[in-house]
Amino acid sequence: MTAARHLLWIALLGGCGSQRPPRSTPAPEREAPASVVAADGTCRVRGRVVDEGGEPVAQAQVSDLWTHEGGRVLQPFDPVQADGAGRFDGTFDVPPGTELCLAAYSLDRRLAGIASFAPSAPPTDPNGLVIVVQPTQRVRGSLASSDQTVPKWTNVNWFPVSPVASRSAVVQAALRDPFFDVPLPRGDWRWLALGKGLDTRSGEIELAAAGADVDLGVIEVPSSTFARLCGQKLPEWKVTDCRGLAKERSALSTFRGRWLLVAFWGTWCDPCVGETIPRLVAFCDQHKDLRPKFEVVVFHDASVRNFEEFDSGVSVAKGRAWNARELPFPVFLDSNGETLRTFGICSFPTTILIDPEGRLVGEADEEVLLQRLAGTPSADSSVATARTQEKQQ
């Protein structure tokens, strides 16, 4: 569940997919503690959903993430459903070092409330975690970009600020068009708008008691740095250290004349080490005859300063997902984050394709590279020759 949840946030998001059926609250033989944290980082939480008068809200749904896709009803991700007395008992993911923030909605989404607690300081109320729900207010608006056509997808993520605060989005509007209309509990909220090929915009709103619905109008979100670079010759990148290629040969201009597939990643990123890197390794193994026409480079993010830290971070993945082998392509470090900023890389993994003239084609994978290689004349193989010589030294 943890991986799915975080991939939903970063991929952000081209929709939330099918929803799991609500988990009904079990009928325990004896009363469980208000919360119990397991070794896998999940937290079992017992509690109750009530309205402002203290009356139970039967069949309310509780989740740490709610998604709204287009005109669909707001849906919970992996929810726990309260019983007829408003009681719930379920397990949720807890990001390390954070509080657990849960939102409860009535089935008609007209009532909602939020509560949070630190797993190290569980609720002391005899009823466990009590979530008080109040009438929701709808917040609507749309996203636009004057320097881009309609994005393929957009997202507006909602973070509670007061009376409950959370560093994680509790509500996400995953949009197939640029319009959103979501019911939110009362309180102060921070919103973050983003989309395919867009930069980000953020702001705050206050949903007061008995207040009217809020119309944010059109939110202008400029194109991202990456989107503006597509089709253009890329500026030179910054390499703080490299492996598999001498540093004096690591300049972007050195690769002119061949297709270049560049993966931006981190050893901390499970999809990177478990999926992207193994796929690139397999592609290079399967297409050795085409190596004079292309190169693969993997650019690590600023979370490591040198290869000692890199080796420490990648040691487990190397044995588990890479069959203990060295990578068959150059590994570059961007310990200052300068290349990530220059290229506008803001999520991981991100794989881009650069043509033989040094122009950014856009985000792509090895299949797109293979299509581009079809019919491509053999390019200057001086870099490949240099890499072979360096490996032999």
Image (cartoon, rainbow, N blue to C red):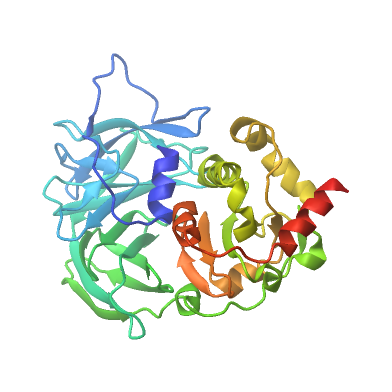
Quarter in which the N terminus is drawn: top left
* Residue 212 located left or right of residue 191: left
Residue 264 % position (x, y): 58, 58
Residue 203, above or below 57: below
User: Could you tell me which residue is drawn at 49 percent across and 53 percent down?
Assistant: 366
* Residue 44 located left or right of residue 106: right
Q: Residue furthest top?
A: 29
Is any atom of residue 207 visible in this view? Answer: yes
User: Could you tell me which residue is drawn at 40 percent across and 53 percent down?
Assistant: 9
In depth, the one of 288 and 331 nearer the eye is 288
In depth, the one of 199 and 51 nearer the eye is 199
In depth, the one of 52 and 230 nearer the eye is 230
* Residue 284 located left or right of residue 130: right
Is any atom of residue 243 visible in this view? Answer: no
User: Could you tell me which residue is drawn at 80 percent across and 47 percent down?
Assistant: 308
Residue 103 % position (x, y): 30, 48
* Residue 392 located left or right of residue 2: right
User: Could you tell me which residue is drawn at 71 percent across and 66 percent down?
Assistant: 336
Q: Residue furthest bottom?
A: 146
